[in-house]
Image: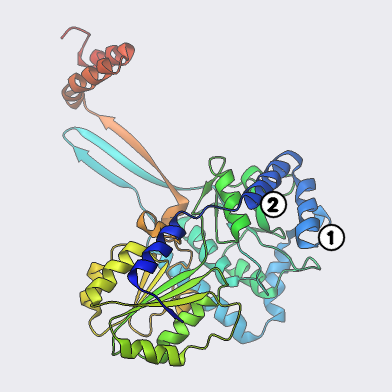
C-alpha cells in the first residue's frame, strides 16, 4: 500500500479523467469495426483467428439452445444453485425498477409518457480465465426484467471454441435468447451492424477491455450503449472502529481485477491505516494499485469521495448516517461491514455494471430503465391551444420560421391577431 497526500491524489485524479485511448488501440478497433460492417461473418472469422487463435466455422458461431439448457448437467449442484440464486436476486431487484407509463394533466394539456422496452438488446460478457457468469446475469436479467423482446449474448470462446458450462447456464437462467462465440471489438461490431449470423440489436451493454470499450464508442449512434467502462475501482472510507482485516481484503479484492484497477483507502485514523497495512498482502504482481490517504475528518473523506466519483464506495464507519448524506457521486455505496462490493459483484441484486473513471458524476449503474425508451403522447384541448399559441408564434418568428408561426396561429381560429 502506498500512502499519498491530497495533492498527489488530485494530480492522479486529473490524469485519470484526461486519459485517452492509445492511438494504436483506436486505430486497430476502427479497422475491425469497419471490416465487420463491410464483410460481416467473414471479418468476424478473421478476427477470431487473428486475435483469439480460434479456428471455427461461422456455422458454429452460435451456441444452440440445447447446449445452454444442458450445461447444468455437467456442473456441480452447488454451482448450479448459486447461479440460479444470483439470477433470481438480480431479476427481482430490477423488476422493482421497471419504468411505467405516466400521465400528467396541466391546464387542458394531457401528456402520456409511455415507457416501451427496446426490441433487442446485445450483452457482452468478457472471458477471463473461465468466463464471467456474473456479467451475463447482471446484464441479461436487467434486460429481461424490462421486457426486452430478444436478448443476444456475445462472449469470447476458448482456444477450442468452447464456452464454459457456467456461462452457458447463466445465460439460460437469465433469459438469453441467442448466444454467440465471439469476443472483442468484432463482437461489438457484429451486434451493432448485424451479420449473416449475428442479429443487429438496438442497444449493447456489458463490460469489456479497452478494445471493447473503444468499439462501443465507435458504434454509438448506429446502436445505443450503456457506458464506456474503464478499469475497476473502489474507495473505502474507514474510521478507527473498522475491522482492518476486512478493509484490507476488500481493497485487495478490487485490485484483483487487474493491474489497471485501483483501490483507495481514505481514513481519519493513522492507527487503522497501520493495521490495514499489516493485514494487506501485496505479493501478487497482477494486483492493481492500492493507495491510502489520511484526512482530518470523515466529512473531508466524504467530500473527497464525491470529487473522485468512484465506481464502488464502501463505508466502514461508526455513524454511516452522518456520512451517507454527504456522498453525491459514486456508482454504488455499500454501508457497513457486510454490504461489501465483492458480494455485490455476484448475488445481492443491484447491478455490478457501474460507471468508472469519474463518470459517476453524470451517469448511473445499469438498470432495467436502460432498456426502456420513452414516447410523449400529447393531447391538447382547444382552450389550452389558444393559451399556448401566442408565445409559440412569437418564438417561431424570432427564429425566422414564418410557416411555423402561421401553422400555430391557425389554432386560434385564423392568422389575425
Judged left or right of residue 250, residue 213 is: right
Residue that mark 1 sits on = 55
Q: Position of residue 167 (x, y in %)?
A: 64, 71
Q: Quadrant of the C terminus?
A: top left
Q: Residue at x 28, y 81 (%)?
A: 268
Judged left or right of residue 256, residue 156 is: right
Q: Residues within 10 Å of mark 1 (few under 14, many from 20)?
A: some
Asked whether the beta carbons under mark 2 and mark 1 sit within 8 Å of each other, the answer is no
Residue that mark 2 sits on = 186
Q: Position of residue 357 (x, y in %)?
A: 45, 60
Q: Position of residue 21 (x, y in %)?
A: 57, 53
Q: Residue at x 25, y 85 (%)?
A: 318
Front-most of 162 and 354? 354
Q: Secondary structure at mark 1?
A: loop
Q: Position of residue 359 (x, y in %)?
A: 41, 57
Q: Secondary structure at mark 2?
A: helix
Front-most of 95 and 29? 29
Earlier residue among tags 2 and 1: 1
Quarter of the image holding residue 246?
bottom left
**Image height of 238 relative to 153, above or below:** below
Q: Residues within 10 Å of mark 2 (few under 14, many from 20)?
A: many
Distance, label 2 to label 1, CA atoms, is 15 Å
Q: How many marks?
A: 2
Q: Determine if residue 56 is in view.
A: yes
Q: Residue at x 28, y 63 (%)?
A: 328
**Image height of 58 relative to 209, above or below:** above
Q: Which mark is residue 234?
A: none
Amino acid at each position: 500500500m502506498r500512502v499519498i497526500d491530497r495533492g498527489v491524489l488530485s494530480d492522479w485524479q486529473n490524469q485519470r479523467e484526461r486519459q485517452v485511448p492509445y492511438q494504436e488501440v483506436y486505430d486497430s478497433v476502427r479497422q475491425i469495426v469497419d471490416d465487420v460492417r463491410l464483410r460481416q461473418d467473414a471479418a468476424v472469422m478473421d478476427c477470431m483467428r487473428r486475435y483469439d487463435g480460434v479456428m471455427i466455422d461461422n456455422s458454429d458461431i452460435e451456441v444452440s439452445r440445447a447446449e445452454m439448457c444442458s450445461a447444468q448437467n455437467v456442473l456441480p449442484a452447488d454451482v448450479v444453485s448459486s447461479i440460479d440464486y444470483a439470477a433470481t436476486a438480480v431479476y427481482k431487484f430490477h423488476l422493482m425498477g421497471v419504468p411505467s407509463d405516466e400521465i400528467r394533466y396541466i391546464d387542458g394539456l394531457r401528456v402520456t409518457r409511455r415507457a416501451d422496452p427496446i426490441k433487442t438488446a446485445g450483452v457482452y460478457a468478457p472471458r477471463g480465465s473461465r468466463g464471467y457468469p456474473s456479467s451475463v446475469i447482471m446484464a441479461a436479467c436487467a434486460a429481461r426484467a424490462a421486457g426486452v423482446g430478444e436478448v443476444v449474448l456475445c462472449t469470447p470462446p476458448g482456444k477450442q471454441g468452447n464456452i464454459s458450462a457456467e456461462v452457458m447456464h447463466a445465460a439460460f437462467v437469465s433469459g438469453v435468447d441467442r448466444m454467440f462465440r465471439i469476443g472483442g471489438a468484432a463482437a461489438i461490431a457484429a451486434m451493432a451492424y448485424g451479420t449473416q449470423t449475428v442479429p443487429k440489436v438496438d442497444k449493447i451493454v456489458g463490460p469489456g477491455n479497452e478494445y471493447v470499450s473503444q468499439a462501443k464508442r465507435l458504434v454509438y449512434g448506429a446502436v445505443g450503449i450503456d457506458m464506456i467502462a474503464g478499469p475497476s475501482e473502489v474507495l473505502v472510507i474507514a474510521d478507527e472502529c473498522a475491522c482492518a482485516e476486512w478493509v484490507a481484503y476488500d481493497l485487495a479484492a478490487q485490485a484483483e481485477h487487474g493491474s489497471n484497477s485501483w483501490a483507495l483507502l481514505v481514513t481519519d485514523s493513522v492507527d487503522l491505516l497501520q493495521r490495514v497495512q499489516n493485514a494487506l498482502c501485496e505479493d501478487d504482481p497482477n494486483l492493481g494499485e492500492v493507495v491510502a490517504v489520511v484526512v482530518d475528518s470523515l466529512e473531508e473523506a466524504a467530500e473527497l469521495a464525491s470529487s473522485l466519483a468512484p465506481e464502488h464506495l464502501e463505508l466502514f464507519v461508526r455513524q454511516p448516517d452522518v456520512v451517507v448524506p454527504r456522498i453525491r457521486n459514486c456508482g454504488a455505496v455499500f454501508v457497513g461491514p457486510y454490504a461489501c462490493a465483492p458480494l455485490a459483484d455476484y448475488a445481492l441484486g443491484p447491478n455490478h455494471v457501474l460507471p468508472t473513471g469519474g463518470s459517476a458524476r453524470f451517469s448511473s449503474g445499469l438498470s432495467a430503465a436502460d432498456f426502456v425508451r420513452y414516447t410523449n403522447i400529447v393531447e391538447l384541448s382547444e382552450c389550452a391551444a389558444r393559451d399556448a399559441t401566442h408565445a409559440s408564434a412569437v418564438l417561431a418568428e424570432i427564429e425566422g420560421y414564418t410557416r411555423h408561426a402561421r401553422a400555430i396561429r391557425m389554432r386560434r381560429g385564423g392568422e389575425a391577431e
